[in-house]
Amino acid sequence: MSMEKAAGLVIKSVNYGENDKIITLFTKESGKITAIAKGARNPKSAYVGVTQLFSYCNFVYYTGRNFAYLNQAELIESFHKLRNDLDKLSKGAYMAEALNQAYEEYESDESALRLILNLLYFMNEGLVQSDEVILLAFQIKLLGYLGFAPNLKKCQICSKDDSGWWFSWDLGGLVCQDCSKSNRQKSKITDEDAEFLRYLQDTPISGLKKTGLYPKELMHLAVILNKTLECHTGKRNRSFEFLLNNN
């Protein structure tokens, strides 16, 4: 076994046996890592705080054949306010699961790590007036990092620059009224919806601002982008159901 060091975010944490936890880390240095934290379920363990969902830490671990084994960890940021707000918790949990599903073991993406860390910080500190905007920014930026940035300027099929759009999640972008007739995996969106998605796609997250769209309209777009992510990953994000039930 070799000892490694990495700064990473806990994106999944599950109980393992009577005393341990298995945690999934998304790290800058080594990408996604699955690690066993021995004794982490013991209330007196030094691992209690550092193995919780959203904990961002400096980790030291040993690499094994199937798992890494946590040796020590120093907490950098806990994002503790997210755990005290069910709506924020559900959105953060969704983002963590989406990241986990999008990347394979040891696959890294520093841009995706910075994205989720910044957006969790924005939610934790209430720096953006709408958490739905944060959610949508995460979804559309992640699609871009994965190489599936939605086409939001013209019809994905005929290239017509029109209005009266539908969004096709299997094609990954806008389709016009005529072309929408041949596509079943789609949902109607307004011109204002399309314009706001373009804004999110083109604007750095530091420039996020409140929109005139209502929360219900924003969640309609979140449903569409979640279906788009699920089409590309081939995995169902179960945290999204929790999110919808608590929104």
Image: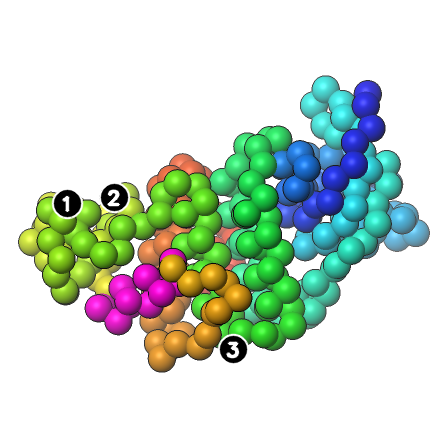
- Badge 2 amino acid: Leu
Q: Is 200 or 185 nearer to us in this picture? A: 200
Question: What's the CA distance linking mark 2 and mark 3?
Answer: 32 Å
Name the front one of labels 1 and 2: 1
Q: Is 60 or 166 nearer to us in this picture? A: 60
- Asked if residue 197 is among those painted magenta in the image, a careful observer would answer yes
Q: Which residue is mark 2?
A: 171
Which x, y percent locates residue 47? 84, 47
Span highlighted in magenta in the image: 190-201
Residue 100 falls in image quadrant: top right
Q: Which residue is mark 3?
A: 129
Question: Which label number is shown at residue 157?
Answer: 1
Residue 22 falls in image quadrant: top right
Question: What's the CA distance linking mark 3 and mark 1?
Answer: 36 Å
The quarter of the rendered structure image containing the N terminus is top right
| CB atoms of marks 1 and 2 within 8 Å | yes
- 1 or 2: tag closer to the N-terminus: 1
Residue 2 falls in image quadrant: top right
